[in-house]
């Protein structure tokens, strides 16, 4: 049903203004952002289809059709992923990507203004926004000052879907460049599991030893995947 045919209090924009954003479903919030649908497909239907679970190709495990599996999956999608969706022109794709970037910047501002471990969940969410949607492994480092506030985040190494090479010397050089007092290590698991491997544990200890030589502490190593994150510090592995 076209939005204009819905009762006024059921139309997403009017409902949001009258009752607040928490009263809207994910599809209704997305419909406000998309604004219009297609010929024969209303914007609410388009929004719901984008949020539906993807249909996987059994041979490759990749999405063959369908949606992105919820808001997180949609906002982690690349521009190339969005291009395959009929009805998402350049303007709509740009708006969706802008929303994700605004979320990243808002969380980065919070982490710069207060000690990161005032809210460990904020750190994990920040890293998920940056890394969880990648189809290849990415190793990143959060560089922190003496008050454990964020100085910068850098993606230092990229690998294949199964492994990545991390050079301790480069991590140490970047820590010295930022005059960091501490770091949080992070990488993603495209497989979807956030359980640390033996290689993850060994890498953490190698980097911890290398950074200790220049008086930089490793506070945590966070592993992220779509919809999940794990703190190795909380598991007693740092």
Image: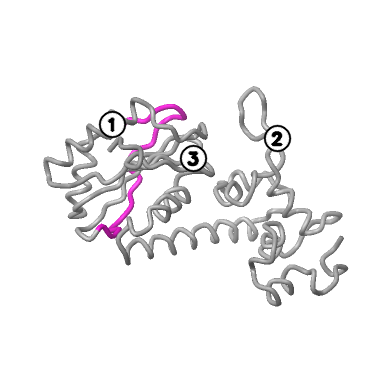
Residue 162 position in % (x across, y down): 44, 27
Q: Earlier in the sequence, mark 1 or mark 3?
A: 1
Circle count? 3
Instruction: Kindly identify the residue that appears in the image at 38 percent across and 27 percent down.
Output: 197
- The reply, left or right, for residue 164 in relation to residue 146 is right
Which tag, 3 or 2, sits closer to the chain's start? 2
Q: x and y percent of residue 98 in the render?
A: 54, 60
Indicate which label's residue lies in the foreground, 3 or 2: 3
How has the structure been colored for display? one colour
Mark 1 touches mark 2? (CB < 8 Å)? no
Q: Secondary structure at mark 2?
A: strand
> Mark 3 and mark 2: span between their CA atoms?
19 Å
Where does the image place residue 45, in percent across and percent down from the top left?
A: 79, 54
Question: Looking at the rendered structure, which numbered label has been put on residue 203?
Answer: 1
Q: Residue at x 19, y 42 (%)?
A: 172
Q: Residues within 10 Å of mark 2 (few under 14, many from 20)?
A: some
Q: Which mark is residue 55?
A: 2
Q: Which one is in front, 71 or 135?
A: 71
Residue at the spot of label 3: 225
What range is drawn magenta here? 148-166
Marks 1 and 2, how far apart at CA: 35 Å
Q: Quadrant of residue 147?
A: bottom left
Instruction: Describe the element under mark 1 as helix, strand or loop.
Output: helix
> CB of mark 3 within 8 Å of CB of mark 2?
no
Please, which residue is most extreme toward the bottom here?
18
Residue 167 is inside the magenta segment: no
Q: Which mark is residue 136?
A: none
Q: Secondary structure at mark 3?
A: strand
Q: Earlier in the sequence, mark 1 or mark 2?
A: 2
């Amino acid at each position: 049903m076209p939005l204009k045919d819905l009762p006024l209090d059921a139309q997403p924009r009017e409902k949001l203004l009258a009752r607040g954003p928490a009263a809207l479903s994910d599809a209704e919030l997305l419909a406000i952002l998309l604004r219009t649908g297609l010929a024969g497909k209303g914007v609410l239907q388009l929004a719901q289809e984008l949020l539906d679970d993807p249909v996987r190709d059994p041979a490759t495990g990749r999405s063959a059709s369908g949606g992105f599996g919820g808001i997180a999956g949609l906002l982690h999608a690349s521009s190339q992923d969005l291009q395959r969706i009929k009805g998402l022109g350049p303007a709509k794709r740009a708006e969706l990507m802008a929303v994700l970037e605004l979320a990243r910047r808002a969380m980065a501002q919070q982490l710069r203004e207060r000690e990161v471990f005032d809210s460990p969940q904020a750190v994990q969410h920040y890293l998920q926004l940056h890394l969880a949607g990648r189809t290849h492994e990415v190793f990143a480092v959060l560089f922190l000052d003496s008050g454990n506030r964020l100085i910068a985040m850098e993606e230092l190494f990229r690998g294949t879907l199964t492994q990545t090479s991390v050079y301790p010397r480069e991590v140490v050089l970047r820590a010295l460049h930022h005059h960091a007092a501490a770091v949080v290590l992070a990488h993603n698991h495209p497989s979807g599991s956030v359980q640390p491997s033996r290689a993850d544990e060994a890498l953490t200890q190698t980097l911890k030893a290398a950074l200790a030589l220049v008086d930089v502490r490793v506070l945590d190593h966070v592993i992220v995947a779509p919809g999940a994150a794990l703190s190795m510090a909380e598991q007693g592995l740092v």
